[in-house]
Image (cartoon, rainbow, N blue to C red):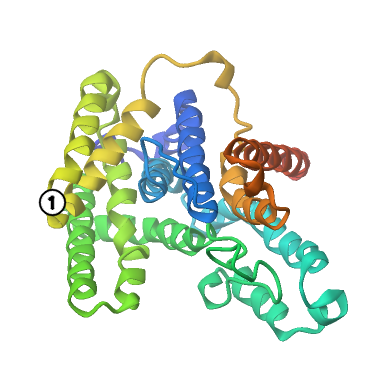
Amino acid sequence: MDYNNGRRVGKGHASHIASAYYPNMDLMRYVLAIAVVIAHIGYLTGYDLSFPLSSFEAVGGFFAISGFLMYPNYIRHGDPLKYTRQRARRILPPYLFIVLASAIGFGLISDLGLSGYFRSEGLWAYLGANISFLNWLHPDLPGVFQGGAYVNPAVNGSLWTMKVEWCLYFSVPLFIWIAGRLRRISPPWIALGVIILSIVYRQILTSLYDETGSEIYNILRRQIFGQLAFFYAGMLVYFIKDFFIRYSVPLLLAGAALKAIIPLTSYTAAIILEPIAVTSIVMALSLFPKDIRALRHRNNISYEIYLFHFPLIQLGIYLGLPSAGMAPMILYSFAATVILSLAVHSVYERWLTSNKR
């Protein structure tokens, strides 16, 4: 038996359990990607830019959407290998492209020169760490983005989430296995338990960071266990999606109200309220029953925008664009990111279509 909308359904329904398409989810992905791009432009250039969602909240929103989609996605495939292969076909090509393109292309601007750059151990360390999704081990390239003009020498500060994303994907088969063992506890209640444990974990790590000042606790609280709350909040919405669709406007307003009061609360309260507020906003907008017809397609480039923007912003700093003013830097960052995203996605979509079975 599988689970759909909080009710057990037969195996015969699994084939269409994930067939629904939500055009507003495409719009929401773009909003989240824009939030991350704006946050990183501000961070890397020093410009005072603001957006209704922070980069951390936007990442949490992406994870909430993934949680909503991955449970029925796994049920539809019914096989860990097929599920993993389907995820890899979507995730890996753009990811590997930006890692390899950065490693090769930025040799042209390295302070070491081409010969010294390609002989440097740092290049191969970067490739090994980033291809294996361990970019935190070696986030920078030799002689690239060094010096006082750069707040951070990292080539792509967005890639840290990818290992988290994969771990969240792989948690779904484990969740379903546990749900099958705990037959007396329905999956929505198990998801709620995971959310609570994730919040407790993040609170403990935050307390340890405040007490010790050790950066390792600050890093760990953002990793997989700290992000489970967003992912499983999205999954919880899937179980009650009819309710969310029916009451999308009140739920959106409730989420916005919660988000507005978070800055006025204690850090403990903020850790509890943040996944609730962000997931309510993101999923209420994603499931809103009326949509923009122009978005009724599946060629969404928000993932590419998320992956590609950071190194392009760094390149803009290398070119001296911040000195020309905020507007040229912002225009360049978005234009370059969108153009590259469209080009790569177009090639990728053709490859994917030609290899569909």
Asked whether residue 171 is in view, the answer is yes
- Name the residue carrying label 1: 269
Q: Is residue 47 left or right of residue 354?
A: left
- The residue closer to the viewer here, 57 or 40, is 40
- The residue closer to the viewer here, 271 or 45, is 45
- The residue closer to the viewer here, 22 or 227, is 227
| Residue 248, above or below 45 | above
Q: Residue at x 31, y 57 (%)?
A: 228
Image x and y of residue 3, in percent: 30, 41
- The residue closer to the viewer here, 6 or 196, is 196
Image x and y of residue 260, in percent: 21, 35
Q: Residue at x 49, y 64 (%)?
A: 163
Image x and y of residue 10, in percent: 34, 38
Q: Residue at x 57, y 40 (%)?
A: 326
| Residue 80, above or below 278 | below
The quarter of the image holding the C terminus is top right
